[in-house]
Image (tube, grey):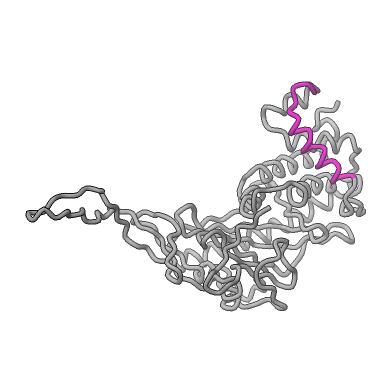
Amino acid sequence: MSHNIHFNEQTGQHSFFSVKEKAWHGLGQIVADYPTSAAAIEYAGLNYEVVKSPLFCNSGAISIGEGGEIIESENIGVPDFYATLRTDCNKVLGVVGKDYEIVQNTEAFAFFDSLLENSYDIRYETAGALGNGERIFITAKLPDYIRVGNEDVIEKYIFLTTSHDGSGSITAAFTPIRIVCNNTLNAALKNMDRVVRIKHTSNAKQRLEQAHKVLLIANNAGSQLEYTFNHWAKVRITDKEVKRLIELALASKETVAFVKEGKEDKIPTAFKNRCTDAFSYAMLNNTQQLETTKGTVFGAFNAITGYYQNVLDYKNEEAKVKSIIYGGTAFSSTEKAFELCDNFSRYGAEALFLN
């Protein structure tokens, strides 16, 4: 899997930093202690500015002067559109409209700094840039945990990303991560949107309000998940039921009917292989042998998140993040898995169409 982490030719370093733990791609700067936002920006190579530059095109037309000389046409301005440009290396990052407001990397970190100013202990754990620096990301660790049983601990994070190419707004999401296997435990929390999107604006008041909103989401979601996961850890599920739950969670709309009706000949081979890999993870992975996971609904849910986090191969890190965090295949499958697990905890095998 390629990483797509930006390599800065001027500094000779990849634009990524991590606290203590070396990233799977083995790139960037590893630091011993949690840095300030100013230091994190430096470590991650995000200390560059982006500007809007007018766009021009050349019509390719030529004319002949009075003396017979060839006169090339002048550049023609493109109205209402601009290129976004990194000022440190003069690289074009994208094309945006006239109303697009650039949000500098320092302003993205200010989203978290507004929380720190209110005495909330968050810690910058990773940050980096992808491509030519058109997309940046930050993960900040919250101080408390979600505890399942006596030995399972889930850390709480806020993940933030923004782009400089006009492809999206600042996006912040609550992301619980199970320490024992580094699974991102996306969950379909009822009546709660875990994602906050902030328009590209320099309005500091809006950033502050949105920061408080995502923090409230994280705190509420953490409490709700702790109750749900502890309940699931006490609900038993058989291997046959785990297999069916995985099939229903991973199936496309077209495949669900085949699975429910047992029409093996119509089920795609690629889908069967994915289910086999996920089921193997559920049965054999060491992280699935804990008291909270072995033979429990919580373990079934972790089997699916673990498959997408630790087994499935992605094109690159950006594709993985999009799939897991931003509504891709992994996200939608874990959302379905959450609903299936919740229904199973209430109604048993009937929820999996096994009765």
For the stretch drawn in magenta, the main secondary structure is helix
Left or right: 53 in relation to 321: left
Where in the figure is residue 219, as x and y percent of width and height? 68, 61
Query: Of 168 and 291, which appears nearest the observer?
Result: 168
Which portion, as a residue range, is magenta?
A: 262-283
Give the residue displayed 63% in from the left and 44% down from the top.
328
Left or right: 179 in relation to 295: left
Q: Which residue is outermost to the left?
A: 66
Where in the figure is residue 247, as x and y percent of width and height? 78, 34
Q: Quadrant of residue 348?
A: top right
Give the residue displayed 61% in from the left and 65% down from the top.
138
Q: Which residue is outermost to the front?
A: 68
Q: How many marks?
A: 0
Give the residue displayed 30% in from the left and 53% down from the top.
80
Residue 196 included in the magenta stretch of the image: no
Q: Quadrant of residue 267?
A: top right
| Quadrant of image for the C terminus | top right
Where in the figure is residue 107, as x and y percent of width and height? 49, 69
Residue 182 in the image: above or below residue 328: below
Residue 272 included in the magenta stretch of the image: yes
Where in the figure is residue 291, as x and y percent of width and height? 92, 53
